[in-house]
Image (cartoon, grey):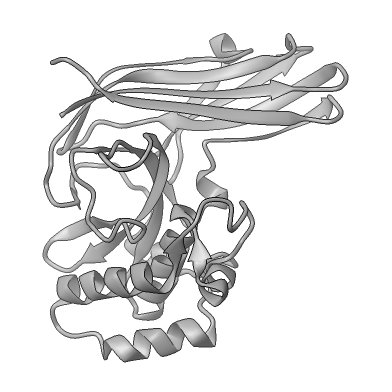
Amino acid sequence: MRLSVSHATHYAYGSQVDYSIQRLLLTPLSYAAQRVVSWQIKAPGVEGALQYSDAFGNRVHLITALKPDEPHTIIADGVVDVDDVAGLVQGLPMRVPDAVFLRQTEATQPSEAMLDMLGGIGERPSNTLNFLHALMGATHGAVIYETGSTHAHTTGAEAFAQGRGVCQDHAHVFIGLARASQIPARYVTGYLIADDVSPAAHAWAEALVPDLGWVGFDAANAKCPTDHYVRVACGLDATGTAPVRGCRRGGADEQMTVEVRVEMAQQ
């Protein structure tokens, strides 16, 4: 499927921004199931941006801007071809060993209640793939999707305790319990277009299956990613994979709004 994506982040301030530096994880990569046809980023200072691949293989733009125009906007858009391979991820660069993705973070650290649910699934069998599908289903059932029920800094354990959350929370719970089962798992950001929900930025997990490789698991929707998903970046948790992250000097009373559009495009 060919998908057209537009992701705009708008900033407005109560006073002049003197200086800003921002790290952008907004560029999808081509791999076996995904081919980037075209992609561009428009932002103050992007012409002189430092571009590099980080240890997780993500394409990074590091931009600086002196007294950027206000309000200012960061726009990433392009066209991507995606195949449905049942979530299998092959052909992506990775500089860190797989064992790095066994490391828990504050966002993924499982609570006793989460571990109790894990115990209900049973001991990890020799068939890791079946176990991960069961974990995805259990996570989906334990955390009801509810927009606005959590925030950017909510941990997986907190979302699990209240039984409500969004895709970020589903991914954190799944990742924390996969790692607790000694299965490397990573947090993934990207985009999703679906028949019953608005096209949006999205997050899911990938876990390492022996003799198969990395496989995606979207616990928010209880399925593996299909050709309706565009994969952008990965890391240990949501904080490390934020699409836009940075700091500034000046610029009081920041207001940020995000607009995402994902559409099927003509091939």
Q: Quadrant of the C terminus?
A: top left
For the residue pair 212 and 76, the one nearer the viewer reads as 76
Q: Residue at x 28, y 71 (%)?
A: 137
17 and 202: which is toward the camera: 202
Above or below — where is 27 with respect to 130?
A: above
User: Does any portion of residue 57 appear in the rendered image?
Assistant: no
Quarter of the figure with the N terminus = top left
Answer yes or no: is residue 215 visible. Answer: yes
Question: Left of 67 or right of it: where is 118?
Answer: left
Residue sitting at the far front: 196
Count of marks overlaid on the render: 0
Lateral position of residue 165 relative to residue 221, left or right:
right
Q: Is residue 255 above or below residue 221?
A: above
Residue 55 image point, x, y percent: 44, 45
In the image, residue 155 above or below residue 91:
below
Task: From the viewer's side, name the closer residue of 91 and 143.
Answer: 143
Q: Is residue 163 above or below residue 235?
A: below
Left or right: 157 as drawn, with respect to 87: right
Counting from the top left corner in percent of width and height, residue 165 is at 51, 61
Taking the spot 38% from the left edge, 36% from the top edge, the residue there is 198
Q: Is residue 50 left or right of residue 260?
A: right
Which of the 4 image quarters holds residue 233?
A: top left
Measuring 84% from the left and 31% from the top, which residue is drawn there? 253
Which quadrant of the figure has residue 222?
A: bottom left
Where in the figure is residue 258, as x and y percent of width and height?
56, 29
Residue at 45% over, 21% down: 76
